[in-house]
Amino acid sequence: MVCLTENRKPIESDLFLNFVPRMKQYFLFFIVFLSGLNALIAQNVMDTIQTDKGRILVYSDRTWQYSTPKNFDGVMNPYLHGLLAKDSVYRFSQRWDNNVCYTSKGNDLTRLRDTIWLCVQDSIHTNYCPPIKGIVTSRYGYRNGKHHNGIDLDLETGDTVKACWSGKVRYAKFNDGGFGNLVIIRHYNGLETFYAHLSKLLVVPNQDVVAGEPIGLGGNTGHSFGAHLHFEVRLYDAPINPEEVIDFKKMVTKDENLLVHGGLFRKGVKPEVHPKDNERPQVTPAVAQNKVYYKVRSGDTLSEIAARNKTTVSKICQLNGIKPSTTLQIGRSLRVR
């Protein structure tokens, strides 16, 4: 009997050694190609659903999100954007991106040289809702040698977290940078709010929300020790002490207006002292060498300022080198004595 293998020609060793690694290369290329194809297929829109809140895009990987208008550039406050982005001095940028926390690079708002009036709540968007009715467990500022860019509010896992102002969801997914499940909302006033460590997301990117609408359930995801809500307020990616805007004890906004200046963005800065509720602002305690100054606020007139400080319009004009017809800039300090 003759063994069949004896009639086979031996494989040349050099040819075999060259053939095997080449097959490995082809195999790896094929795997990479398939993974790229799968990623591409996963992003394909399989269906669209029209709802009262907008058009929903449904993807083949069973994820979905609201679509945005073709020409939407993420600008929610055109007036503020015109000051910050178009001014040749500031040139601050801010994109609309559903995949990253921060959409700009190098926005140093401590460089602001002027004071900008930001309308926190206007005649159209008048509502505010506390994100969660919990006590403050950690404030904005330095903590254990690191800067804490937000404020922590106590809650139980599963508690409903709500949008504090109306706006549009820019980001809603798990964030591996420490936030865990994170929702970011860009508001009509130009601010963005961050809601971190959620146990569940109740909104999707590009969804329009109104103040008080549920956006997630409280939790302990990400870099967190115990269930709580990490809440941030940002302007063009620069963090602001949330207590500049919100009274977390009374659960109301401190003022319908916010005077934005470079000092707001210094790390660790404490909130400014605001006047008591329903009380007209009094003379700013900037007294030196018997000089008294008053900071102009929204709605002020020279006659009101003069009456409030027991002086006359002509005296204020004389002390400040202005005319009775001069337009008062919000945030300007006027000498009244």
Image (cartoon, grey):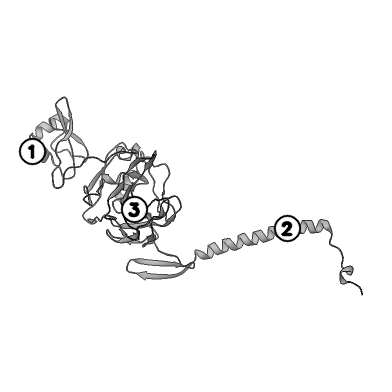
Q: Position of residue 75 (x, y in %)?
A: 34, 52
Could you give the CA–CA distance between mark 3 and mark 1, rounded to whole angstroms?
45 Å
Which tag, 3 or 1, sits closer to the chain's start?
3
Name the side, left or right, on which 86 lies relative to 329.
right
- Nearest the camera: 306 or 270? 270
Query: Where residue 229 is drawn, which disc sits there?
Result: 3
Give the labeled residue for mark 2. 22
* Mark 3 touches mark 1? (CB < 8 Å): no
Which residue is pictured at 38% across the width and 67% down the height? 55
- Return the mark for residue 255: none
x 78%, y 56%: residue: 17
Amino acid type of disc 1? Ala
Q: Earlier in the sequence, mark 2 or mark 3?
A: 2
Q: Is residue 312 above or below residue 37?
A: above
Residue 85 visible? The answer is no
SS assignment at label 3: strand
Query: Residue extending furthest right?
Result: 1
Residue 98: percent from left, percent from top: 42, 56
Q: Is residue 243 visible?
A: yes
Mark closer to the chain start, 2 or 1 = 2
Marker count (numbered): 3
**Residue found 16% across the figure and 44% down from its top:** 276
Q: Residues within 10 Å of mark 1 (few under 14, many from 20)?
A: few
Which amino acid lies under the numbered mark 2 shown in the image of this protein?
A: Arg
The part of the image, by quadrant, that contains residue 266 is: top left
**Circle 1 residue:** 307
